[in-house]
Amino acid sequence: MGNCVSNSGAFEPPGSKAVAEFIQQHERETDPRWIAVRIAEERAKAAGGAGGGGGMMTEQPKKPKGPLCSICRGVVVVGVNPWQRTKSDKFVLDLADSDDEGEGGQPESSAAVTQRRAAKLKKLDRHGIALQPCKHVFCGACLSDAICRNLRTPFDPSTYGEKAGTSSTSPTTLQNAGRMEFPMGCPTCQVKPGEAIVEISDMTARLVLGEPNMDPWNHARFLSTLNLIYCPHKGCGEAFDADDVAPPLEGASAIAKNLVQCPRCKNSLCKSCKVVWHDRYSCEDFLKLPLNERNPEDLLFYEIAAQEKWRRCPKCSAMVELKFGCNHITCTCKHHFCYQCGSDFEHKGGKYQCKGGKGCKVWEEENLLERR
């Protein structure tokens, strides 16, 4: 009978074929062996198309379109885990290289292998991420480089996705490059006075840096919870917790209660105004002293500051030098002030302006020309 169902085969539940196809497709997309096979097939297809055209011009593949990295301006494939995606791509690349070495029959020199791998690395996709809520896009290597610079840790873009980065820059140079900035904000956002920074979260750092590089980030987060003092003595700059020093002796004067000792150079400094220790003077009286009555090192520093027209941040007291740009200064502590008079800067009516009331201009061409 034509309408009878044969009982010779096993019964398949509805949708089983679709499930099997989905599992097979998922394996082809995620299994490194299938990815290597697909790369080999695409390579063979490209080689056949280039050689079997019969003299006809073949159409060049179009450059992939996508968002551009805000730093290097390269095309970025936005995803959720740039480090892991880059690591997977490099694993497949090494797997394909091992197959190529076996086909030639003759071993290649290490220099040839390194050169061939470097050429293939340039063709890999730049996996990146988009920060929220500013929507700025970065490739993983560029954002990792920006984070590592703030953390004063070495970084090598060529090792991104493989291991913790290393750099030719000496650790001493990195440590003396400046103070760590934490929490960190978007490298390209221009934060206006009164606005909060677009902060890079712990999860974003983990997805961009990779788990092997998280130790400096976690250390910086820990330091941000402390009341840090940077030793002002020449050649030191050690950062330590002001609340972790030995408490003052009972009966000590109000001035002596601010006396602390640097754990590195063992020199004395003032915990309140964060300068070299000023014996017999309160912080207010010491700052009122003329320069020639202070510490000789302080005198030399202030002479250089006056000669170079440096300006001290009114909030954190950090010294700032204007090399180029306008008089609107954004300090590392995120305070906005005027480089000309030291007053606060505000953003009002769509414009930046100095609140000092002295008519300071945002741009002064003459001063900029003098600094060249």
Image (cartoon, helix red, strand yellow):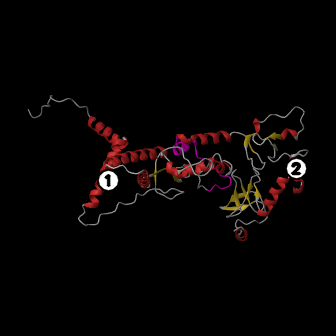
200 falls in the magenta region: yes
Residue 115: in magenta span: no
Outermost residue to the left: 1
Q: What residue appears at the point 88 percent right and 50 percent down from the top-left corner?
A: 286
In the shown orientation, is residue 100 left or right of residue 7? right
Can you tell which of label 1 and label 2 is closer to the viewer? Answer: 1
Give the left or right position of residue 328, taking residue 291 as reference: left
Q: CA distance from mark 1 to mark 2?
A: 74 Å
Residue 92, image quadrant = top left
Q: What kind of element bears circle 1?
A: helix
In screen coordinates, is 90 left or right of 274? Answer: left
Give how far across and how far down residue 151 sits, in percent.
62, 47
Q: Name the quarter where the N terminus is drawn.
A: top left
Residue type at mark 1 is Arg
Coordinates of residue 244 in the picture (x, y in percent):
75, 35
Residue at numbered disc 2: 286
Task: Determine the main secondary structure of the stretch shown in magenta.
Answer: loop
**Residue 209 visible in the shown view:** yes
User: Callout 1: few (<14), some (14-19), or many (20+) C-alpha neighbours within 10 Å?
Assistant: few
Mark 1, residue position = 43
Q: Residue 132, image x and y in percent?
A: 54, 48
Q: Do we see residue 129 in this rendering?
A: no
Q: Amino acid at mark 2?
A: Phe
For the magenta stretch, what is the residue range? 190-210
* Residue in the image at 75% along x and 52% along y: 318
Report the residue at 36% width, 47% height from top: 96
Q: Position of residue 305 (x, y in %)?
A: 78, 59
Q: Nearer the viewer, residue 164 or 310?
A: 164
Q: Earlier in the sequence, mark 1 or mark 2?
A: 1
Secondary structure under tag 2 reads helix
